[in-house]
Image (cartoon, coloured by chain):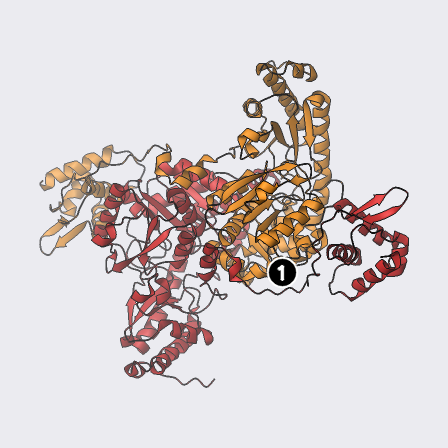
Chain colours: A orange, B red
Amino acid sequence: MDADVVCDLLAQRLWTQPGASLLKTRLYLVLRQAILDGGIPTGIKLPPSRMLAEALMLGRNTVVRAYDQLLVEGYLETRVGDGTYVVESLAVPGRKPCSSAARLQGSVELLSVRGRRIAGMKTSSAVQHGAFMPGIPDTEHFPFATWRRLLSKYIRREQSHLLNYGVGGFGPLRAELADYLRATRLIQCDPRQVMIFNGTHQAIDLCARLLCDNGDRVWMEEPGYWGARTVLDAAGLNTVPIALDEKGMAPTAADWAHPPKLVFLSPSSQYPTGITLSLERRLELLANARTRGAWLIEDDYDNELRYHNRPVASMFGLDGAERVIYMGTFSKVMYPGLRLAYIVVPPALVDAFGAGNAEMYREGRLTDQAALAEFIAEGHLAAHLKRMRSIYRERRDTLREILDTRLGGALTASGGETGLHLLYYFNHPVVDTRVAEASIARGVVIRPLSIYYIDKARARQGMNLGYACVPVPKIAPAADVLCQVIERQSVAGGRSPELAGICAVHDDPG
Amino acid sequence: MDADVVCDLLAQRLWTQPGASLLKTRLYLVLRQAILDGGIPTGIKLPPSRMLAEALMLGRNTVVRAYDQLLVEGYLETRVGDGTYVVESLAVPGRKPCSSAARLQGSVELLSVRGRRIAGMKTSSAVQHGAFMPGIPDTEHFPFATWRRLLSKYIRREQSHLLNYGVGGFGPLRAELADYLRATRLIQCDPRQVMIFNGTHQAIDLCARLLCDNGDRVWMEEPGYWGARTVLDAAGLNTVPIALDEKGMAPTAADWAHPPKLVFLSPSSQYPTGITLSLERRLELLANARTRGAWLIEDDYDNELRYHNRPVASMFGLDGAERVIYMGTFSKVMYPGLRLAYIVVPPALVDAFGAGNAEMYREGRLTDQAALAEFIAEGHLAAHLKRMRSIYRERRDTLREILDTRLGGALTASGGETGLHLLYYFNHPVVDTRVAEASIARGVVIRPLSIYYIDKARARQGMNLGYACVPVPKIAPAADVLCQVIERQSVAGGRSPELAGICAVHDDPG
């Protein structure tokens, strides 16, 4: 291949190939690609830079820079007094140039076995807001100005030490949380027992890795929080569903015959049913955990948002700091994107969790933690919570009243005294996933209850409705759509004509 | 047990037990504890609230509140027209009260097998700054005012949607990164291929979980980045060290006889040796990865901090987006506590990594991502990098000159053309961990080279010195301490008296 042929080949590729690169990098890319795909064979001499520049109508510097880069990278070599060659010994793959508009299609077979499981658990929708997305707090009433002031306060040269990895978290935040938990959750702990994470999933993950091995059994409430299930499953644990009764998680003697290494539960307000775990069950679980060497993760995700009774004390406090890991989050009381959560571990686990947190995740975000500590200390969090409790209660009451009025006999409510959502069971045979699909198609997001079950065969049919991120005036129109969908589904399903009579049907002109 | 005895018992415990709780919660805690430890037996009648209040010299409301709370929680029950009883059927554990000043001693036997491994890998020190901590950038010269302005800009009611979970990350940041990588790393990718993480450890973790199963083999450079090893090991992978030669990672035919599922490597500038992987090796690794179905993680942790030659193109670009996952971080170019990193995945993995990221970690932090996108788009990152390259080069040259002058023949340098650290091998038999211990004891942190090896028996002795976070005037005094330590260690070791002559010894009066 002589110099003219090389010039022609490069000219053709340079001006015909798609791609928005600058000319200087484009020549480099085209020449490199021609070497890699065999268009320009190894061992041949390249045209002198002046000649190639003229042929390509480029400045000579552009060609020199491309040659230089490929020299540095080992594609080309110079022979003294001779010229520039493509390295003879290059084992080029000879493949075709790859289109930059590559297809973005998934290929499940590329994944590992657990990778397929994780990717297959995708349940979170692209929509993360609006009627009636569960678990999403209001973000309109957040005290933006205060938070902005506090966040900015710690981004300063005088506090540049806060920009570092920050092993162990921000001490004052841990102390603030220890005080807060003492006052609100009757938890007695040393600030060193408080560990900060980028969200509860990270905290659950560390518990699973430090306390359990592959194949260990973990009990979960059925129905329960599926996000935890994904994380525990991905950590190699064997998730075992334990049925609920009206007193909460109700393991049977048969369940206890195969005791778990870990129990994941939400005793204050079970997710999604809102059931409070009875004292009797708490004591039983703790006693068994002690004798059988099991650990408990107490997920206290929305305890701060209790609308009536005062909160029930934590299991952590009841346990005397032995087998319980208490977990809280700022996703509901501040906002989800903040990604700050915490756990309180028994004293005997402080060292291990400190090491694990540092080694696995490297921590950091001390400026955010400092702002949060001050947000709590100055009383802004308490004030925000007080305000939001009243706003949420009004939204809940509005939604509940509409559903009670229009679908009264068709639904049975569960919980609703706390948190951001209302759970309803369908009294008549309706397939909840179909209700959800039809409702989402009309712009109203609901979560079918059955997806919260591990064992789908045991699933009760119902729906989980988040009202917290829906202003009162928007609740009625969305609830109207939902009522229509439920009525039509029950008719379409052909199983429950009586439901049609109960629902107050409004014809949808669309 | 009659009412007077109950009053006495509670009075004694209330006023003698340690604990800083408010009286209203303290009475609740003491009464609950007395029930739980059997001090007050189940089934007995409690004194009327007025009587107990007088006995304890408390307001009656305080007693009523404590009773009410314990009623709600199921410890007590009221019998109509009679009084308040401790629930007869309570299965109380009868344990001793737990001291709130609990010991914080670690108990390794409480952990799982993998938990012990993770906790045992603790190598990060509490000190994360100063001479000569490797991997730590300067945080004094960061453009605080600009960053503060951008961070604040997105904490606003009008942008409250940014406070949500933010599945998929902030689109404009992904687009900005795709452009940046096209210009600087010759990576052609769609913004959807770019995924945002809370640091590289999280990204490595997701790769391990989605692409590998327990027991799968992962190759790592030897020596290599230990943090990745912890994460990969914790994900159940079998980390196999592959020796380096002057061209980088050098797998032998015997290594290829047991091909890996994943290869973790830093081809631009191998950590910690600074070796650039040769083109020949790159092509060989890629060809083998394709035929054997292995994945590569290209850790490009400090490519932006190259002081002389222009950067070598990425392996991702060379591969044509098939088997390579490219990884970058803002820990070095911005600051470590920011906890933002990214990967670019092949098109075929976009769906799976999107689902995995959402399900495993829930993402979020869109306000930070928006600020970062604008920081890049407005040119602040490029300007900061330009400035820091010049500052870091001066610091590197200062340290290198001192060590060359005083310890010239005792040390052999490796790399140093990029990044934040200098690596030196000891030419004489010195135990590097002892040098590190002695140096740290005198306030100068260094990392012994041997800790970067999986197979300690093959470890070369040396030291990794971070200069980036040390202002020039502080380099000479710290280097002086280090030189003294090395000289003394070599004498103390009794193995290398000739080293004493090479080091210019200054007596330490301390």
Regarding residue A510, the answer to whether it shows in the image is no
Which residue is nearer to you in this view: B251 or B72?
B72
Three-letter amino acid code at disc 1?
Answer: Pro
**Residue B206 located left or right of residue A480:** left
Circle 1 sits on which residue? A191
Residue A145 pos. (x, y %): 64, 47
Residue A18 pos. (x, y %): 28, 33
Quadrant of res A139: top right
Regarding residue A227, the answer to whether it shows in the image is yes
Quadrant of res A41: top left
Question: Which SS class for mark 1?
Answer: helix
Does residue A140 lie above or below A489 as drawn? below
Residue A389 pos. (x, y %): 71, 40
- Residue under the image location 38 percent in, 54 percent down: B301
Residue A301 pos. (x, y %): 63, 44
- Residue under the image location 84 percent in, 57 percent down: B1
Q: Chain of mark 1?
A: A
- Residue under the image location 40 percent in, 54 percent down: B228
**Residue B352 located left or right of residue A203:** left
Does residue B224 lie above or below A202 as drawn? below
